[in-house]
Image (cartoon, rainbow, N blue to C red):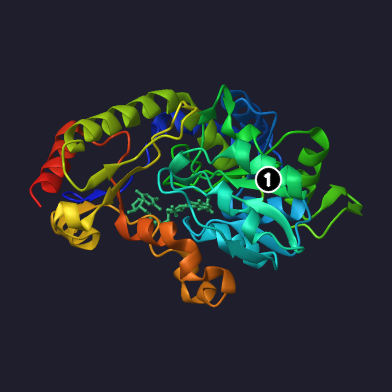
Amino acid sequence: MNNNKILVTQPVMPSLHEFIPYLEKIWESKWLTNNGQFHQQLESELADYLGVKYVSLFANGTLALLTALQTLKISGEVITTPYSFVATTNALWWNNLKPVFVDIDPDYHNLDPEKIAAAITPNTTAIMPVHVYGNPANVERIQEIADIYGLKVIYDAAHAFGVNYKGTSVLNYGDLSILSFHATKVFNTFEGGAIISHDEKTKKRIDYLKNFGFADEVTVTAPGINSKMNEVQAAFGLLQLKGLNTNIEKRKAIAEQYNEGLKGIKGIKLFNEFPGTKDYNYAYYPIFIDEREYGKSRDELYFHLKENGIFGRRYFYPLISNFPIYKGLESSNIGNLEIANITAKKVICLPIYPDLASFEIDRIIKLLETQ
Ligand code: T4K
């Protein structure tokens, strides 16, 4: 269907042949959801792969975010970044929480820890940063501030599958982290997600909450939700996990080819890993256009690429705080979010996925050179 089009991403499909035996097992057992055998196996294999203590699987990342906020009974105001996918802020809204946007730093595009304290009020109960593009937020500084003010930290780590920071998984920071396993992600289960927790009691509470609040047949511990992952998704995840390291290597090679081809072009700023990052996952390949130096605006380039069949995406534009639904919040004041506003106007994420061919990357680089 998309013969000449190159989209921003494309999932890697494991062989259908290899998937059939998993489906046969599901058919035989007639166990389709509610903590089935593949669900249990995937939780355990993911905990090993990621180097974390507890994984609770979810039907998608958004439900994981909603449930994480319920798990810690967050109330009042939550400090977050406007430079993210809209699901981050929507999850606050669905929990009746007030999002308070704080600006990002210009080099790594994550919440600027030095600007958090000024946004804290007596109603602030938590910070919800995002590891944008899988690049670790400044987890150490954020924790210091959270400790001083007695705040919880929930990371939206939707992009940060497999990323380590200073010798441990970046998911081990904060009180909870959530992952997305959407079709567009480095690791996917069609749709899917997870909450990473660090102790058994919290894991239990999360698992009750995602299953209506049931602790057993007759005990409902909280007004829970149904956000469980089913057995077909979990089986697909087990199969995805097998080829994952190879696929991340392929992503890395693509990023290196782009880096080499683009490094000399004036007005194109490349992505920087936050110092201390290990095992970056190459989830996205953002570039940032300086209109004056490059000679064309970001949007002119974006549409030029489109006309040539290259469908990059402007992740994350518009800024969440500029959507009409959130613009009215006093914390969306443009003066406070200067760097985020500038960044959202400069970014294009170029196509990156394991099956993207080298000659296609060369073609994209040529288009960027000859603008
Ligand atoms: N927090 C953050 C920071 C997030 O980035 C996200 C999701 C979430 C939370 C919420 O997690 P989930 O509830 O989604 O698990 C896409 C994804 O739908 C979304 O998961 C992702 N972030 C966001 C950054 O990107 P769109 O609206 O750009 O998706 P769409 O349908 O335009 O797809 C993008 C490209 O991917 C298409 O051009 C083609 C390709 N594609 C897409 C699908 C669905 C495929 O090749 N196959 C597919 O099945 O949001």
Q: Is residue 171 visible?
A: yes
Residue 257 position, x and y percent, is 22, 30
Question: Could you classify mark 1 by the number of other residues whose Cα lies within 10 Å: few (under 14), some (14-19), or many (20 or more)?
Answer: some
Number of marks in picture: 1
Residue 292 position, x and y percent, is 19, 57
Q: Nearer the viewer, residue 81 or 219?
A: 81
The residue that appears at 45% across and 35% down in the rendered structure is: 274
Rendered position, 336 above or below 111: below
The residue that appears at 16% across and 58% down in the rendered structure is: 296
Q: Nearer the viewer, residue 358 or 10?
A: 358
Q: Amino acid at mark 1?
A: Ile
Rendered position, 6 above or below 251: below
In the displayed structure image, the side of residue 211 where residue 293 appears, left or right: left
Residue 141 position, x and y percent, is 61, 40
Residue on which the image places disc 1:
145
In the displayed structure image, the side of residue 260 where residue 76 appears, left or right: right
Where on the picture, by quarter, is residue 298? bottom left
- Report the residue that reaches farthest toward the left: 370
Residue 314 position, x and y percent, is 33, 57
In the displayed structure image, the side of residue 348 where residue 132 appears, left or right: right
The residue that appears at 81% across and 60% down in the rendered structure is: 223
Q: Nearer the viewer, residue 292 or 185?
A: 292
In the displayed structure image, the side of residue 24 where residue 183 appears, left or right: left
What element does badge 1 sit on? Answer: helix
The residue that appears at 54% across and 28% down in the rendered structure is: 165
Rendered position, 225 above or below 267: below
